[in-house]
Image (cartoon, helix red, strand yellow):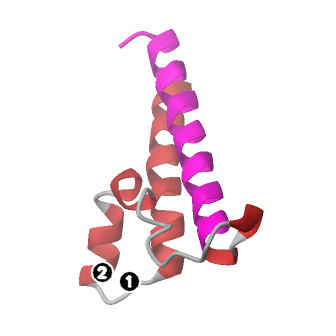
């Protein structure tokens, strides 16, 4: 992959991660008149694979690992872009 392609992937992934975090906040706190929804963090799961599965297997499953798992993938993509 070219440097420009990796840059686009990093930006797209970061945007999807930000949108998923925003949807989690809206669904959790009921912002903008939205009803509170326990499934509001659903979009974070595919973004955080495989780290959220690994965290669950070693007993660290929970909201914090679901929120932070996509950050690991974002860091890996950023590293690939900058290497």
Circle nearer the N terminus (1, 2): 2
Q: In this rendering, would 62 be left or right of 82?
A: left
Residue at coordinates 34% horizontally, 64% vertically from top-left?
51
Residue at coordinates 45% horizontally, 31% vertically from top-left?
80
In-front residue for pair 18/9: 18
* Label 1: how many Cα within 10 Å (few below 14, some 14–19, many 20+): some
Q: Is residue 72 magenta?
A: no
Magenta-highlighted residues:
1-27
Q: In this rendering, would 34 be left or right of 80?
A: right
Q: Which residue is mark 2?
A: 56
In-front residue for pair 15/31: 31
Q: Position of residue 29 (x, y in %)?
A: 69, 76
Residue 33 badge: none
Occupied quadrant, residue 76: top left
Q: Residue furthest left?
A: 57
Q: In this rendering, would 56 be left or right of 70?
A: left
Q: Distance between the Cα atoms at labels 1 and 2?
A: 4 Å
Q: Which residue is mark 1?
A: 61
Tell me the SS state at disc 2: helix
Residue at coordinates 58% horizontally, 65% vertically from top-left?
24
Q: Please, what is the dominant secondary structure of the magenta stretch? A: helix
Up/down of 13 relative to 7, above or below = below
Q: Is residue 8 magenta?
A: yes
């Amino acid at each position: 992959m070219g440097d420009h392609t990796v840059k686009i992937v990093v930006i797209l992934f970061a945007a999807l991660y930000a949108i998923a975090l925003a949807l989690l906040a809206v669904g959790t706190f009921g912002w903008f008149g939205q009803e509170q929804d326990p499934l509001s963090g659903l979009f974070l799961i595919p973004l955080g694979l495989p780290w959220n599965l690994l965290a669950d297997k070693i007993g660290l499953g929970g909201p914090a690992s679901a929120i932070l798992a996509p950050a690991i993938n974002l860091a890996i993509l950023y590293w690939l872009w900058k290497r």
